[in-house]
Amino acid sequence: MKIDNMTSGINYGYTGQPSKNNQGRKQLGYEQYSGTDCQQTGQWQASLYSVNVIVSIQKGTVMPYHQSQPVKWKLVDYGVDKELTSSR
């Protein structure tokens, strides 16, 4: 008995192409380490012991170190806050 692929014509909510608003955008929760080039403009958070550090970083900028130590940064927001912008 032959079973044909019957998915044609069924819409699963995925078009195969990213929406224009999210094209090339990294998902919230995306992680990067200090010293690497930032892959997404936005607000990044590092959890250090019991302290959360949040900075705004532009795409292409080197991810900052915290007190001369490498840390893992997590993307938490796509907005950029001028007061949080990394001076690196």
Image (cartoon, grey):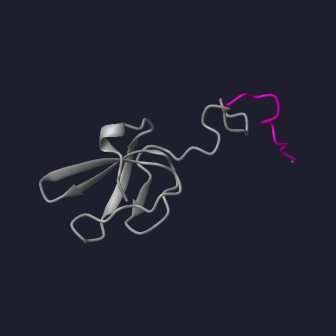
Residue at the image point whose x is 87% and y is 47% from the top? 2
Q: In which quarter of the image is the C terminus?
A: bottom left
Q: Which of 18 and 43 is in front in this view?
A: 43
Q: Does the magenta stretch include residue 78?
A: no
Q: In which quarter of the image is residue 21?
A: top right
Q: Nearer the viewer, residue 31 or 12?
A: 31
Q: Position of residue 19 (x, y in %)?
A: 66, 32
Residue at the image point whose x is 50% and y is 63% from the top? 37
Q: Main secondary structure of the magenta part?
A: loop
Q: Is residue 17 left or right of residue 35?
A: right
Q: Does the magenta stretch include residue 5?
A: yes
Q: In which quarter of the image is residue 84?
A: top left
Magenta stretch?
A: 2-12
Q: How many labels does the image show?
A: 0
Q: Residue furthest front?
A: 87
- Residue 76, compared with residue 35, is above or below; it is above
Q: Is residue 72 left or right of residue 18?
A: left
Q: Where is residue 57 in the image (x, y as percent from the top left)?
A: 42, 49
